[in-house]
Each structure stands twice: as structure tokens, then as C-alpha cells.
Image (cartoon, rainbow, N blue to C red):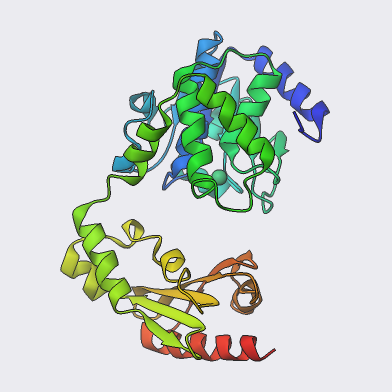
């Protein structure tokens, strides 16, 4: 247990103990941590005698539909009034989308999150940015409360940690993450099956378009920059949507000699989304702040009010300047 601020965690326990009905929600466009922390916490509370209801806006990605309790998630807001709402893995309230109605109808709110940028929008905000994932934070809190954590809950928590640590390789993976993960394995989870479900189920057209885009990767500045544009035309060719095509910017970063990778996504005629990844020597957030974007040294993103070809010129030039500094 290394939760820095044990006081507020105990305040949280009082709120839980004094609540009969609890709503849980996480962010729209769900990912592994969003789903794993939501389902894991929901399951633990239910196992420990609480009445809960889970809410989430947006379609559940195909590869996460194996998660225990997934069918118990409500994807539309309702008029139910809850004593307490728990918001997981959301750095600001806009992330819950239309579930804001359920949030507003709840008597008390608690946020549990690991994003540094969290703006503290609940009555009690438990924000611990040292944690690999919201799932891991939820796990430690529940352990601290002495809640029973069974195999189904552990499966969900494991999925959260696995995905938010990039399969335990990002530097948010701590030795404590590994100890927590070992405890989850001891609860009997089938960790290789979990990984197979999440990572071994890519849609065929998504697989094909990614390979096509990567085969046309462009290199600049003596091979120090790799760049891949994703146009609307190519998405139409393969019948996939932009949100399905992720991971390319990481793949083209992992090439020998490349210091920064860039993916350009054509949102509309004068709107291009830029994603940058760095191996660490070049600070890509220095570029994104110039365009009102966010991120950190190794991963940053922003939008340009230019078409995709113009955006390419701007980025290649910005990266040249950044490398000369
Ligand atoms: Mn997360």
C-alpha cells in the first residue's frame, strides 16, 4: 500500500458505507483501463453487498466483450437517483459524455483517476498519477478496504493494467505494479487468454489498412523522422473508421534510427490531427504546446487547421527546427 494520502481514501470508505445505491461510470470511447476499472470495481462492490449500476457511453470494442459482467453495463443515461456516483479514469467531466445526467442526479460524487491533468470535478477526488492505471489504483483501494476480490474482478483489473502499461513495458509500470499483478494471477485468472482476447482479435480490414499505411511510411531528416498520413480516402477503401486505426505511430517509432514518429489523420478538409511519439531525446510536447495541444515528452498530440499535405510540411519543418536545438 503506497497511497500517499490515506486520509482521503478513508473518507471514501465512509461515503461507500453510507451509500445504498452506487452508480459507476467511466469515459466514452472505452479502452481497457476504462472498462477494466469500471467492471472490476463494480464487481467488487457487488460481491461485497452493494447495490450498483454501471454506465458508459459508446460502443464496447469487440476485443473487450469477453470481460466478466460486460453485459451489465448500461449505455444510456436514465432517471435513477443514486446516493453516490463513482467516476473512473476521467480527467474532466466532459469525458463521461451523456452520462452527465446520471452524474448530476447523484447525491455525492467521487473521482478515481491517474491522469496528472485531472481537474478535480467531484466532491472527493482520488487522483494518484504514480499509478500505472486506474485499475491498479482501484485494486489497492479495495484491498485496503478489506473487500473480497474474486477471479472475475481480478480478470477485469488485470485487463486494465495490461492495456494501460502497454503489456508492462511503459515506464508507468512499477515494481508495485508487478507485485499487484502477481496477486491477481494468484486469484486464478487466465492471463494468457485475457491477452489473446485483447490482442489476438484484430479486425481483418484494420490489419490490412495498417499494413498498407505502414508500407508507405515516409522518412525525413536522415531517417530520424518517420511519418504516416491517414487520409479519408484510404479509410473508405478499407471500410474502417479512424478510431479503429491506432498503434501505427508507435510501430513506426520503433525503427532503427528513428527519433520521432508522426501520424497525420485527416479529420476534415481544414482539420488534421497530429500524433507524435519520441524515443526520449526530442521533447515532442514542445511542439504540441505551440499548437494548443497536450501530452508529454514522449507522446503528444494536437490539431492543425490545415489540410493533410500542408500539415505534413508544417510538421516536418517544426521537427527540423526542434532537432537543431
Ligand atoms: Mn487509464
Q: Is residue 110 left or right of residue 166?
A: right
Q: Say above or below: 320 vs 191.
A: below
User: Is residue 280 found left or right of 27 in the rendered image?
Assistant: right
Quarter of the rendered structure image containing ligand 1: top right
Q: Is residue 219 above or below residue 231?
A: below
Labels in figure, total: 0
Depth check: 78 or 220 in front? Answer: 220
The answer to whether residue 233 of the structure is visible from this angle is yes
User: Residue 233: x percent and y percent?
Assistant: 22, 75
- Which residue is at a point 39% across and 28% down the rendered structure image? 73
Q: Position of residue 208 (x, y in %)?
A: 22, 63
Q: Is residue 122 above or below residue 82?
A: below
Q: Quadrant of residue 127?
A: top right
Is residue 60 visible in the rendered image? The answer is: no
Quadrant occupied by the N terminus: top right
> At 54% from the left edge and 25% from the top edge, which residue is drawn?
184
Q: Identify the residue at image location x=52%, y=33%.
A: 37
Quarter holding the C terminus? Answer: bottom right
Q: Position of residue 106 (x, y in %)?
A: 58, 27
Position in image of residue 250 (x %, y %): 46, 64
Q: From the viewer's perspective, tell me whether residue 141 is left or right of residue 205.
A: right
Q: Residue furthest top?
A: 49
Between 308 and 148, which is closer to the camera in this rendering? 148
Which residue sits at x=65%, y=75%?
281
In the image, residue 228 sits, relative to residue 6, either above or below, namely below
Amino acid at each position: 500500500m503506497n497511497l500517499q494520502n490515506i486520509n482521503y481514501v478513508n473518507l471514501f470508505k465512509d461515503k461507500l458505507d453510507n451509500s445504498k445505491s452506487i452508480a459507476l461510470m467511466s469515459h466514452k470511447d472505452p479502452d481497457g483501463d476504462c472498462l477494466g476499472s469500471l467492471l472490476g470495481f463494480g464487481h467488487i462492490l457487488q460481491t461485497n453487498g452493494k447495490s450498483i449500476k454501471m454506465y458508459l457511453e459508446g460502443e464496447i470494442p469487440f476485443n473487450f466483450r469477453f470481460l466478466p459482467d460486460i453485459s451489465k453495463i448500461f449505455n444510456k443515461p436514465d432517471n435513477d437517483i443514486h446516493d453516490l456516483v463513482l467516476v473512473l479514469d476521467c480527467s474532466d467531466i466532459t469525458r463521461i459524455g451523456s452520462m452527465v445526467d446520471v452524474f448530476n442526479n447523484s447525491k455525492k460524487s467521487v473521482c478515481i483517476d491517474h491522469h496528472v491533468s485531472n481537474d478535480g470535478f467531484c466532491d472527493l477526488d482520488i487522483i494518484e498519477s504514480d499509478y500505472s492505471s486506474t485499475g491498479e489504483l482501484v485494486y489497492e483501494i479495495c484491498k485496503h478496504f478489506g473487500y473480497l476480490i474474486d477471479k472475475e474482478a481480478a480478470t477485469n483489473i488485470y485487463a486494465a493494467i495490461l492495456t494501460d502499461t502497454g503489456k508492462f513495458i511503459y515506464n508507468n509500470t512499477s515494481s508495485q505494479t508487478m507485485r499487484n499483478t502477481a496477486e491477481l494471477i494468484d486469484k486464478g485468472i487466465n492471463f494468457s487468454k485475457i491477452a489473446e482476447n485483447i490482442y489476438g482479435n484484430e479486425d481483418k480490414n484494420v490489419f490490412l489498412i495498417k499494413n498498407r499505411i505502414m508500407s508507405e511510411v515516409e522518412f525525413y531528416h536522415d531517417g530520424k523522422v518517420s511519418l504516416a498520413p491517414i487520409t479519408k480516402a484510404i479509410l473508405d477503401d478499407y471500410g474502417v473508421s479512424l478510431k479503429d486505426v491506432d498503434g501505427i505511430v508507435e510501430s513506426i517509432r520503433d525503427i532503427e534510427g528513428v527519433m520521432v514518429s508522426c501520424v497525420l489523420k485527416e479529420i476534415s478538409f481544414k482539420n488534421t490531427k497530429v500524433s507524435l511519439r519520441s524515443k526520449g531525446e526530442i521533447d515532442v510536447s514542445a511542439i504540441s504546446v505551440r499548437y494548443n495541444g497536450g501530452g508529454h515528452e514522449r507522446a503528444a498530440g494536437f490539431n492543425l487547421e490545415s489540410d493533410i499535405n500542408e500539415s505534413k510540411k508544417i510538421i516536418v519543418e517544426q521537427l527540423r527546427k526542434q532537432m537543431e536545438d
